[in-house]
Structures are given as C-alpha cells and as structure tokens.
Amino acid sequence: MPAKVQDTSRARTKQNQLRERRAALGFLAPNLLGFLLFTIIPIGASLVLSFFEWPLIGNAIYAGFDNFVRLLTQDPVFWPIVGNTAYFVVGYVALNLAVSLGLALWLTTRIRFRGFYRFVFFLPVVSPMVANAMVWRMMYRREDGIIAQVLESVTGTTGPNWLGDTRWSMLAVILMSLWAGFGYNMIILIAGLEAIPGSIHEAASLDGANWIQRLRNVTLPLLTPSLFFATVMTIISSLQVFAQPFILTGGGPGISTSTIVFYLYQKGFQAYEMGYASAIAWILFLVIMAITLVQFRLQKRWVHYS
Amino acid sequence: MTTSNQASRSRLTLGISQTLLTLAALVVLFPFVWMFSSALKPTSEVFSTPPSLVGSEIMWSNFAEAWTYLPFGRFMMNGIIVSGVGTLVVVVSSSMAAYAFSRLRWRGRDGVFLVYLGTLMIPQEVLVVPMFILMRYLGWIDSYLGLIVPWAFTAFGTFLLRQFFLTIPDELEDAARIDGANRWRTFAQIVAPLALPAVGTLAVFTFIGYWNSFLWPLLVVSDVNMATVPLGLNMFLGQTGNQWNLLMAAAAISVIPSAIIVLALQRYLVSGIALSGMGGR
C-alpha cells in the first residue's frame, strides 16, 4: 500500500514538473525567439563581420585582424575622434553631475511648486533630441543667433562662433547636451535623497551640525550609491553620443565634433564598409566595458552601502 | 524677539531661493519658448536685431505650412504606429518572459537568464550593422516591421519586470492554483495586474524610446512616407534650408506630445527612474 501511494505521488510531481516546463516554454517562446534572432545572432554576426572586409555590394573577404590594425594604427582620423569623444564624455559627465546634484539638493529643500520645477527640468529629457538640437543650432548662430545677441548686449561682443570654430564647437555640443540631459540624473538623485530617513538629519542637527557639515558627512555619503549609478550610466550613454553632433554640426567644422558613433555611421552607412564599422563598434564596446569595470573596482573607495 | 528675527530671516532666504530657482527654470525653459516664438514669426524676422519674442505679426499659418510642407501628419501617424505597436509587443512579450524567469521552475533557467543579463551591457551600435544587413535580407527596409521588430525583444524589459515579479508574494498565486487556475490564468489575473506600476513604467519608457529614436530610422528609412518624427525633422532640415520659422513650427509640434506625456505620466516616469536608478540600494 504505502509503496503504491508513493508511486502515484511521484508520478504526479513528475507530471507537474512536465506541465510547468511546458508552460515555461509557452511563456518564454515569443521573447526568446525574438531575442535570439535580433540580439544574439546580430551580436555574433557583428563579431564575425569585424574580421571581414565587406563593401555592402560585393564579396566579403576574410581579413583577420586587418580592420582592427588599420583602425588603431593607420587610420589618421580614429585617434582624434577618440579624443573628441573623451572630451565630450569628461565635460558632459562632470557638468551633468554637478548641475543635477545641485538642483536635486535644491529641490529637496522646503520650497514651493516643486512639481512645476521638476516638470520644466525634465521636459528636455523626453522631447526629441533632434528637435532639441535644432533649436540650439538656431540659437548658436554666429552674429544673429539669440545667444550672440544677448552676449553682445551684455559684454559688447557677440562672443565665439560657437558651431563654426573648432575651438568652441565641442563645448557648444556639450552645453546643448547638458541642457537636454541633466534632468534625468536630477530625478535619480532626488529619489536617492528622498530615501534618506529624516531622523538621520534630525539627529545630526541636534548634535549641532550645520548645513554644510550635514551635507558633507551625512547627505553625500548616503547618496553615493545613487551617485555611483548615475555616473556609470551617464558615462556609458555619453560614449554613444550621436544625434547632437549630427544635427548641430554634422561632425564639423573639420572633424572637431566627430565622435566614435558618428564615425561608425560614416564608415558603415555612407562608405558602406560594413566590416570596418563593426570593428569600430567592438572597440566602442571594449571601451565601455573597460571603463565600467574600472568604476566597479573603484567603487569600494567612495560608495557607501548601508 | 530673536525667534521672530530668525523666522523672518528664514522667510527671506526662502524667498531668495524661490526666486533663483524660478530664474533657473526660465533659463531651462527658454529654448522651448524661443522655438515657439520663432515658429510664429514671419520669415524675415526670425533673426531680427534686436531680438524680440513676438514678431510684427503672429503667423499661425506657419504651423499649417510646416504641417503640409513635408507630410508631417504622416510622420506623426508613423510615430504613433511604430511606438504604439512596439510598446505593445515589448510589454506583452517581456512580461511573459519575466514570468517564466521569476515564477516557473525549469532546467537551464538561470543560465538563460544570465545570457539575457550579459547582453544588457552591449551598446546598440554593435547591433546596427548586422541588423541593417538583416533588414535588407528580409526586405524590411522602409517598413514598419523594420522600424519596430529589431528593438522589441531586447533584454531590458524582461530584466526590469522579472525583478518586480520577484517581489510579489507566492501565496497569492498559490491560493488561486489550489482553486484550479492554471498558469496562464494566474499570470493574466493575478501577477500582471499586481505588476501594473512596473508594466506602466516600462510602457512609458519604451514608447518614448521608440518615439525619439533617431539613429535606427536614419539607417532603415529613406522613403519620406515612412519617416518617424525625428527623422522627418531631419529631412525638413535638409529641405527647407533657411526657413527657420517653419522648421521651428515642425519642432514645436514634435515637442507637444512629449510635454503631454511628462504632464500626464510624471508619476510613472519618476517612479520608473527611481526603480531602475536605485540599482545600487
């Protein structure tokens, strides 16, 4: 008797497992199929492509590491473009974090109409980047743009030729991107600030800590996880900057605002060198990976997890 | 005496703080104001000296002209179709997959999920070259399929919803299963409704992502009738040359849906950013 009971219950669990597995397959199938076709296979194909020389119309020729060697050692444009991208990333990330942190701290003080300010600061984040860049392209015009005219009425000169001078063009792209992007980190940091228990602040105040002491010793340390996340994500996304230089300057003047992705676009979709463009993409990926790994290594030094 | 002094001093700081913040908000808002203002000016006054917010004449007709100069209604319709269908596919397929990853037990589950996770780090640019070749091969250039499908199955949505599904207690589902409900019913009637905040957040972000996407439409669309809004704006820029008032009218039209989304769904946006942005905590 007992043996038989065990038998049927084991059969039942086995049947249950089978049913669960079949259900899992049903739930997973649509997404997994698409994921294989449109993520996994393209990743593999991209890696393979980077070892081929393939003008879109014509035959692919196996080239070994030629694309990478050419890119890193012979291409006269590649390193200047890496430099431009680094300039953008450093300038944009530093300004973005400073502005978003400042405003997040400001917006969590006792202030009225918080919702309104949050709306205004967040609006450029969701409005199309192409539209954002277009209005700035108009505002940046040399003599008659609104920025030049305001500068003239204040300082007496129209200021630099923002988009036409290689010394200023990347700064112009950075400032425009800052305006379009800081609202995102601001929201992340506000959420981080609001998660800090009020009792900690009260305790610090009772101990006689003033505003600056509380900021340095309480608020900022407790905010470091959010700051770390914002920094990592902002660096990753700014390494991929494309639409802003595309619309504002077309990568110019010269190549002063050409970035890695802009160059990838030119090589892949204007010169149709598919293998070369894939090699650029993988270099970009390696740079992103390396920088992110280093940041995770360094986080122990400054990020506090409670 | 001192307390009333302190109170009035803190009211003064609050007033100054409020004023400065309003100034900052006006500066940030200004490019949009300038966009609308330029959109309403006659062509000759867009770059007038001295600059003025209002031209000699308010040209509402610029909006009508921008709307018909290129098929802007068509751009908006394409944008709505691509973003709407894309969002639907993303939400349905990734919530189903998230369910399989979080609530069902099957062999190989954690391994497959690890592969999903691994692709999160890979930038879109690695995918665009082979994806473009695939689109040519499938004949999806200049089509809705080509705009929607390639980005409808990325790992992000599945990852986000799985994390949320894991926070829903098992007991709720178990009770329904004892009453005889199968997995599809408990998914549709218990887990999915409870996950609505997370699903809503994913939907809003996916919609905005599709709506604003520029690089991919630039690659797979050359037919003006298949352009989405950002691509349409870029075509506009190429064609109008110096008619900045029409260009700004078109840009202004494209900003309005975004403004409505922020106003109506700010709560979802904020909670969504907090949700994905609090990864460190």
Image: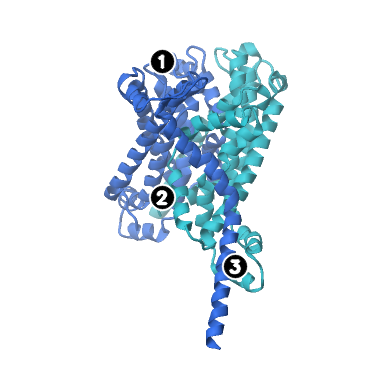
Chain colours: A blue, B cyan
Task: Quickly name the residue at label 3.
Answer: B173
Residue type at the position of mark 1: Pro
Residue at the disc numbered 1: A160
Q: Position of residue B279 (x, y in %)?
A: 43, 51
Distance of mark 2 from mark 3, alpha carbons? 60 Å
Q: Which mark is residue B116?
A: none
* Both labels 1 and 2 in a single chain: no
Q: Is residue A45 left or right of residue A115?
A: left
**Residue at disc 3, secondary structure:** helix
Say few, some or many: other residues with alpha carbon within 10 Å of mark 3 (under 14 / 14 to 19 / 20 or more).
Answer: many
- Reading the image, the residue beneath label 2 is B5
Q: Chain of mark 1?
A: A
Q: Residues within 10 Å of mark 1 (few under 14, many from 20)?
A: some
Q: Position of residue A208 (x, y in %)?
A: 30, 56
The mark nearer the N terminus, 2 or 3, is 2
- Residue at coordinates 30% horizontally, 59% vertically from top-left? A207
Distance of mark 1 from mark 2, alpha carbons? 48 Å
Residue A150, above or below A292: above
